[in-house]
Image (cartoon, helix red, strand yellow):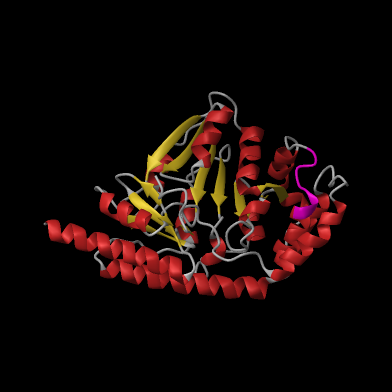
Amino acid sequence: MAAASGARHLLAQNEHPYPPLPSVLAALAGAVADLNRYPDFRPERFAGIIADWQGVPAGQVVVGHGSAGVALDLFHSVVRAGDNVVHSDPCFDAYPLFCGIAGAEARAVPLGPDARHDLAAMARQVDARTRIIVLCNPHNPTGTVYSWAELTGFLRQVPATALVLLDEAYIDFARDWRAPDVPDRIAAWPNLVVLRTLSKSHGLAALRIGYAIAAEPVARRVREVQVPYAVNRLQEAGLLAAVTAQEEVDRRIAEITAERERLRDELLALGRSVPPSLTNFLWVEAPGDEGAVAAELERLGVAVRFYPGRGIRIAVGEKDANDAVIEGFTRAHRTVTALR
Protein backbone atom coordinates (compact mmCIF):
# COMPACT_ATOMS: atom_id res chain seq x y z
CA MET A 1 0.00 0.00 0.00
CA ALA A 2 1.31 3.48 -0.81
CA ALA A 3 0.08 7.03 -0.60
CA ALA A 4 -2.09 8.52 -3.32
CA SER A 5 -0.88 8.30 -6.89
CA GLY A 6 -0.71 12.10 -7.09
CA ALA A 7 1.97 12.26 -4.40
CA ARG A 8 4.64 14.93 -4.69
CA HIS A 9 7.30 12.96 -2.84
CA LEU A 10 7.78 9.56 -4.47
CA LEU A 11 9.54 7.47 -1.83
CA ALA A 12 7.91 4.08 -2.43
CA GLN A 13 10.26 2.51 -4.99
CA ASN A 14 13.74 3.22 -3.61
CA GLU A 15 14.53 5.53 -6.50
CA HIS A 16 17.48 7.90 -6.61
CA PRO A 17 16.19 11.37 -5.63
CA TYR A 18 18.30 13.27 -8.17
CA PRO A 19 18.07 13.38 -11.97
CA PRO A 20 20.79 11.76 -14.10
CA LEU A 21 24.20 13.42 -14.16
CA PRO A 22 24.72 16.03 -16.91
CA SER A 23 27.37 13.83 -18.52
CA VAL A 24 24.89 10.96 -18.74
CA LEU A 25 22.19 13.18 -20.24
CA ALA A 26 24.67 14.45 -22.82
CA ALA A 27 25.66 10.91 -23.76
CA LEU A 28 22.01 9.91 -24.14
CA ALA A 29 21.32 12.91 -26.35
CA GLY A 30 24.25 11.96 -28.57
CA ALA A 31 23.01 8.38 -28.89
CA VAL A 32 19.54 9.39 -30.09
CA ALA A 33 20.80 10.04 -33.62
CA ASP A 34 21.49 6.31 -34.08
CA LEU A 35 18.11 4.99 -32.99
CA ASN A 36 17.41 3.82 -36.54
CA ARG A 37 20.20 1.24 -36.12
CA TYR A 38 19.95 -2.06 -34.29
CA PRO A 39 22.05 -2.60 -31.19
CA ASP A 40 24.48 -5.51 -31.06
CA PHE A 41 22.89 -8.92 -31.63
CA ARG A 42 24.67 -10.05 -28.48
CA PRO A 43 25.78 -7.27 -26.10
CA GLU A 44 29.47 -8.10 -26.21
CA ARG A 45 30.63 -4.48 -26.23
CA PHE A 46 28.27 -3.67 -23.37
CA ALA A 47 29.53 -6.64 -21.36
CA GLY A 48 33.08 -5.52 -22.10
CA ILE A 49 32.43 -2.14 -20.49
CA ILE A 50 31.16 -3.88 -17.35
CA ALA A 51 34.10 -6.31 -17.37
CA ASP A 52 36.66 -3.50 -17.59
CA TRP A 53 34.87 -1.52 -14.91
CA GLN A 54 34.66 -4.45 -12.50
CA GLY A 55 38.00 -6.04 -13.34
CA VAL A 56 36.65 -9.41 -14.45
CA PRO A 57 36.88 -11.41 -17.70
CA ALA A 58 34.06 -10.59 -20.10
CA GLY A 59 33.09 -14.27 -20.07
CA GLN A 60 32.00 -13.90 -16.44
CA VAL A 61 29.58 -11.05 -17.18
CA VAL A 62 25.89 -11.30 -17.98
CA VAL A 63 24.02 -8.10 -18.84
CA GLY A 64 20.34 -7.50 -19.30
CA HIS A 65 17.22 -5.44 -18.81
CA GLY A 66 17.87 -4.29 -15.27
CA SER A 67 19.02 -6.60 -12.51
CA ALA A 68 15.51 -8.07 -12.45
CA GLY A 69 15.85 -9.01 -16.12
CA VAL A 70 19.18 -10.70 -15.51
CA ALA A 71 17.74 -12.55 -12.51
CA LEU A 72 14.81 -13.81 -14.59
CA ASP A 73 17.24 -15.02 -17.26
CA LEU A 74 19.08 -16.92 -14.53
CA PHE A 75 15.81 -18.54 -13.44
CA HIS A 76 15.06 -19.53 -17.04
CA SER A 77 18.52 -21.05 -17.41
CA VAL A 78 18.55 -23.34 -14.36
CA VAL A 79 15.06 -23.77 -12.90
CA ARG A 80 12.65 -26.42 -14.11
CA ALA A 81 9.12 -27.28 -12.99
CA GLY A 82 9.30 -29.14 -9.69
CA ASP A 83 12.52 -27.43 -8.57
CA ASN A 84 12.50 -25.03 -5.66
CA VAL A 85 13.91 -21.61 -4.88
CA VAL A 86 14.67 -20.44 -1.34
CA HIS A 87 14.23 -16.75 -0.55
CA SER A 88 13.40 -14.56 2.42
CA ASP A 89 10.00 -13.22 3.36
CA PRO A 90 9.64 -10.36 2.74
CA CYS A 91 12.06 -9.83 -0.12
CA PHE A 92 12.29 -7.98 -3.43
CA ASP A 93 8.86 -8.47 -4.99
CA ALA A 94 10.20 -9.90 -8.25
CA TYR A 95 11.59 -13.12 -6.80
CA PRO A 96 8.28 -14.76 -5.83
CA LEU A 97 6.96 -13.76 -9.28
CA PHE A 98 9.96 -15.39 -10.97
CA CYS A 99 9.29 -18.60 -9.07
CA GLY A 100 5.80 -18.66 -10.54
CA ILE A 101 7.06 -17.93 -14.04
CA ALA A 102 9.63 -20.73 -13.80
CA GLY A 103 7.17 -23.19 -12.23
CA ALA A 104 9.30 -23.52 -9.12
CA GLU A 105 8.21 -24.04 -5.55
CA ALA A 106 8.90 -20.82 -3.65
CA ARG A 107 10.27 -21.59 -0.20
CA ALA A 108 9.83 -18.30 1.60
CA VAL A 109 11.66 -18.08 4.93
CA PRO A 110 10.63 -15.35 7.41
CA LEU A 111 13.31 -12.89 8.44
CA GLY A 112 14.88 -13.18 11.86
CA PRO A 113 14.06 -10.82 14.75
CA ASP A 114 16.93 -8.55 13.70
CA ALA A 115 15.24 -7.87 10.30
CA ARG A 116 17.94 -9.92 8.56
CA HIS A 117 17.85 -13.21 6.69
CA ASP A 118 17.44 -16.20 8.97
CA LEU A 119 20.38 -18.03 7.40
CA ALA A 120 20.04 -21.11 9.57
CA ALA A 121 16.37 -21.52 8.63
CA MET A 122 17.16 -20.91 4.97
CA ALA A 123 19.85 -23.59 5.03
CA ARG A 124 17.31 -26.07 6.42
CA GLN A 125 15.06 -25.43 3.42
CA VAL A 126 17.74 -26.41 0.88
CA ASP A 127 17.56 -29.87 -0.66
CA ALA A 128 18.56 -31.69 -3.85
CA ARG A 129 15.86 -29.87 -5.86
CA THR A 130 16.95 -26.38 -4.78
CA ARG A 131 18.30 -24.54 -7.79
CA ILE A 132 18.60 -20.96 -6.50
CA ILE A 133 18.94 -19.39 -3.07
CA VAL A 134 18.29 -15.64 -3.09
CA LEU A 135 20.17 -13.45 -0.62
CA CYS A 136 19.69 -9.69 -0.89
CA ASN A 137 22.65 -8.02 0.79
CA PRO A 138 21.91 -5.26 1.70
CA HIS A 139 18.42 -6.62 2.15
CA ASN A 140 15.34 -5.25 0.47
CA PRO A 141 13.08 -4.13 2.18
CA THR A 142 14.92 -3.82 5.53
CA GLY A 143 18.31 -2.38 4.49
CA THR A 144 20.17 -4.77 6.79
CA VAL A 145 23.38 -6.63 5.93
CA TYR A 146 25.40 -9.70 6.72
CA SER A 147 29.17 -9.64 7.05
CA TRP A 148 31.17 -11.58 4.50
CA ALA A 149 32.21 -13.98 7.26
CA GLU A 150 28.55 -14.71 8.01
CA LEU A 151 27.79 -15.19 4.33
CA THR A 152 30.71 -17.55 3.78
CA GLY A 153 29.54 -19.57 6.77
CA PHE A 154 26.23 -19.98 4.95
CA LEU A 155 27.91 -20.77 1.63
CA ARG A 156 29.72 -23.68 3.26
CA GLN A 157 26.34 -25.27 4.02
CA VAL A 158 25.01 -24.95 0.46
CA PRO A 159 25.44 -27.84 -2.01
CA ALA A 160 27.20 -27.06 -5.28
CA THR A 161 23.99 -27.95 -7.13
CA ALA A 162 22.32 -24.77 -5.82
CA LEU A 163 23.27 -21.32 -7.09
CA VAL A 164 23.42 -18.54 -4.51
CA LEU A 165 22.09 -15.34 -6.07
CA LEU A 166 23.65 -12.53 -4.05
CA ASP A 167 21.59 -9.49 -4.99
CA GLU A 168 23.77 -6.45 -4.34
CA ALA A 169 21.49 -3.81 -5.86
CA TYR A 170 22.28 -1.41 -2.99
CA ILE A 171 25.90 -2.32 -2.33
CA ASP A 172 27.25 1.09 -3.38
CA PHE A 173 25.53 2.63 -0.36
CA ALA A 174 27.21 0.13 1.99
CA ARG A 175 30.51 1.97 2.13
CA ASP A 176 31.64 0.37 5.39
CA TRP A 177 30.84 -3.19 4.27
CA ARG A 178 33.96 -5.24 3.56
CA ALA A 179 34.36 -8.31 1.38
CA PRO A 180 36.88 -9.71 -1.10
CA ASP A 181 36.72 -8.33 -4.62
CA VAL A 182 34.05 -9.98 -6.73
CA PRO A 183 36.53 -12.01 -8.86
CA ASP A 184 37.99 -13.53 -5.70
CA ARG A 185 34.53 -14.36 -4.37
CA ILE A 186 33.57 -16.10 -7.60
CA ALA A 187 36.84 -18.03 -7.67
CA ALA A 188 36.26 -19.27 -4.12
CA TRP A 189 32.56 -20.02 -4.63
CA PRO A 190 31.78 -21.11 -8.23
CA ASN A 191 28.07 -21.41 -7.40
CA LEU A 192 27.89 -17.72 -6.38
CA VAL A 193 26.22 -15.21 -8.71
CA VAL A 194 26.65 -11.51 -7.82
CA LEU A 195 23.84 -9.34 -9.16
CA ARG A 196 24.05 -5.55 -9.49
CA THR A 197 22.30 -2.59 -11.09
CA LEU A 198 22.79 1.03 -12.08
CA SER A 199 19.20 1.84 -11.08
CA LYS A 200 19.97 2.81 -7.49
CA SER A 201 23.33 4.46 -6.81
CA HIS A 202 23.66 5.78 -10.37
CA GLY A 203 20.05 6.92 -10.66
CA LEU A 204 19.32 5.21 -13.98
CA ALA A 205 16.22 3.20 -13.06
CA ALA A 206 14.40 3.99 -16.31
CA LEU A 207 17.33 2.84 -18.46
CA ARG A 208 17.17 -0.68 -16.98
CA ILE A 209 20.88 -1.46 -16.79
CA GLY A 210 21.67 -4.59 -14.81
CA TYR A 211 24.43 -7.17 -14.75
CA ALA A 212 25.63 -10.27 -13.00
CA ILE A 213 29.10 -11.66 -12.45
CA ALA A 214 29.44 -15.43 -12.21
CA ALA A 215 31.75 -18.32 -13.02
CA GLU A 216 32.10 -18.62 -16.79
CA PRO A 217 30.04 -21.85 -17.14
CA VAL A 218 27.17 -20.26 -15.21
CA ALA A 219 27.38 -16.99 -17.14
CA ARG A 220 27.48 -18.83 -20.46
CA ARG A 221 24.41 -20.85 -19.56
CA VAL A 222 22.47 -17.68 -18.79
CA ARG A 223 23.56 -15.93 -21.97
CA GLU A 224 22.30 -18.89 -24.01
CA VAL A 225 18.69 -18.21 -22.99
CA GLN A 226 18.76 -14.45 -23.47
CA VAL A 227 16.81 -12.67 -26.19
CA PRO A 228 18.96 -11.10 -28.97
CA TYR A 229 19.14 -7.29 -29.20
CA ALA A 230 18.24 -7.13 -25.52
CA VAL A 231 20.52 -4.17 -24.70
CA ASN A 232 19.98 -0.98 -26.68
CA ARG A 233 22.19 1.93 -27.70
CA LEU A 234 20.79 4.30 -25.10
CA GLN A 235 21.62 1.83 -22.34
CA GLU A 236 25.16 1.46 -23.67
CA ALA A 237 25.71 5.22 -23.90
CA GLY A 238 24.29 5.76 -20.42
CA LEU A 239 26.42 2.98 -18.96
CA LEU A 240 29.65 4.28 -20.42
CA ALA A 241 28.99 7.81 -19.17
CA ALA A 242 27.90 6.63 -15.72
CA VAL A 243 30.91 4.43 -14.98
CA THR A 244 33.30 7.24 -15.91
CA ALA A 245 31.68 9.70 -13.50
CA GLN A 246 32.41 7.86 -10.25
CA GLU A 247 33.47 10.99 -8.34
CA GLU A 248 30.09 12.62 -8.99
CA VAL A 249 28.28 9.39 -8.16
CA ASP A 250 30.18 9.12 -4.87
CA ARG A 251 29.30 12.68 -3.93
CA ARG A 252 25.60 11.98 -4.43
CA ILE A 253 25.83 8.76 -2.44
CA ALA A 254 27.38 10.73 0.44
CA GLU A 255 24.52 13.24 0.33
CA ILE A 256 21.89 10.50 0.36
CA THR A 257 23.67 8.68 3.19
CA ALA A 258 23.77 11.84 5.31
CA GLU A 259 20.04 12.41 4.75
CA ARG A 260 19.34 8.75 5.56
CA GLU A 261 21.03 9.07 8.94
CA ARG A 262 19.27 12.37 9.69
CA LEU A 263 15.91 10.82 8.86
CA ARG A 264 16.65 7.73 10.96
CA ASP A 265 17.68 9.87 13.95
CA GLU A 266 14.40 11.80 13.78
CA LEU A 267 12.33 8.62 13.58
CA LEU A 268 14.23 7.05 16.47
CA ALA A 269 13.56 10.19 18.52
CA LEU A 270 9.84 9.57 17.97
CA GLY A 271 10.25 6.13 19.52
CA ARG A 272 10.13 4.21 16.26
CA SER A 273 12.22 1.07 15.75
CA VAL A 274 14.41 1.58 12.67
CA PRO A 275 17.24 -0.92 12.02
CA PRO A 276 20.55 0.53 10.80
CA SER A 277 20.46 0.70 7.01
CA LEU A 278 23.24 0.51 4.43
CA THR A 279 20.98 1.42 1.52
CA ASN A 280 19.11 4.45 0.19
CA PHE A 281 16.02 3.62 2.26
CA LEU A 282 14.89 2.92 5.81
CA TRP A 283 12.72 0.18 7.30
CA VAL A 284 10.41 1.32 10.08
CA GLU A 285 9.13 -1.65 12.05
CA ALA A 286 5.33 -1.47 12.16
CA PRO A 287 3.65 -4.62 13.50
CA GLY A 288 0.40 -2.82 14.30
CA ASP A 289 -2.11 -0.45 12.70
CA GLU A 290 -0.39 2.43 10.94
CA GLY A 291 -3.54 4.20 9.75
CA ALA A 292 -2.52 7.48 11.37
CA VAL A 293 0.86 7.48 9.64
CA ALA A 294 -0.70 6.55 6.31
CA ALA A 295 -3.25 9.35 6.57
CA GLU A 296 -0.69 12.01 7.50
CA LEU A 297 1.77 10.99 4.79
CA GLU A 298 -0.98 10.97 2.18
CA ARG A 299 -2.11 14.41 3.27
CA LEU A 300 1.46 15.65 2.85
CA GLY A 301 1.78 14.05 -0.58
CA VAL A 302 4.32 11.40 0.47
CA ALA A 303 4.26 7.95 -1.14
CA VAL A 304 5.99 5.17 0.82
CA ARG A 305 5.70 1.38 0.79
CA PHE A 306 3.61 -0.24 3.51
CA TYR A 307 4.02 -3.90 4.43
CA PRO A 308 0.89 -4.33 6.58
CA GLY A 309 1.64 -5.80 9.98
CA ARG A 310 5.39 -5.73 9.29
CA GLY A 311 6.90 -2.41 8.44
CA ILE A 312 7.14 0.71 6.32
CA ARG A 313 9.89 1.15 3.73
CA ILE A 314 10.86 4.75 3.05
CA ALA A 315 13.27 5.74 0.30
CA VAL A 316 15.56 8.64 1.14
CA GLY A 317 14.58 11.66 -0.91
CA GLU A 318 15.73 15.23 -1.14
CA LYS A 319 15.62 17.28 2.05
CA ASP A 320 12.09 18.61 1.58
CA ALA A 321 10.75 15.11 0.99
CA ASN A 322 12.49 13.78 4.10
CA ASP A 323 11.19 16.75 6.09
CA ALA A 324 7.67 15.82 4.98
CA VAL A 325 8.20 12.26 6.21
CA ILE A 326 9.35 13.54 9.59
CA GLU A 327 6.36 15.88 9.80
CA GLY A 328 3.94 13.07 8.93
CA PHE A 329 5.34 10.69 11.53
CA THR A 330 5.44 13.48 14.13
CA ARG A 331 1.80 14.39 13.59
CA ALA A 332 0.78 10.73 13.67
CA HIS A 333 2.74 10.27 16.91
CA ARG A 334 0.89 13.21 18.50
CA THR A 335 -2.47 11.82 17.36
CA VAL A 336 -1.80 8.35 18.72
CA THR A 337 -0.37 9.73 21.99
CA ALA A 338 -3.45 11.92 22.52
CA LEU A 339 -5.72 8.91 22.17
CA ARG A 340 -3.97 6.86 24.82
At x 29%, y 52%, the residue is 286
- Report whether 194 appears left or right of 55: left
Say which of 35 and 212 sits in front: 35
Q: Which span of residues is magenta-colored?
A: 228-234
The foreground one among 330 and 174 is: 330
Image x and y of residue 114, in percent = 33, 55
Task: Give the side of residue 1 with respect to residue 268, left or right.
Answer: right
In the rendered image, which quarter contains the N terminus? Answer: top left
Q: Position of residue 70 (x, y in %)?
A: 65, 44
Determine whether 177 is above or below 207 in the image.
below
Which quadrant, please, contains the C terminus? bottom left
Visible residue check, residue 315:
yes
Residue 253 is left or right of residue 147, and the answer is right
Whether residue 290 can be seen here: no
Q: State the predominant SS element of the stretch in magenta.
A: loop
* Residue ranking furthest to the left: 340
Determine the image quadrant of residue 42: top right
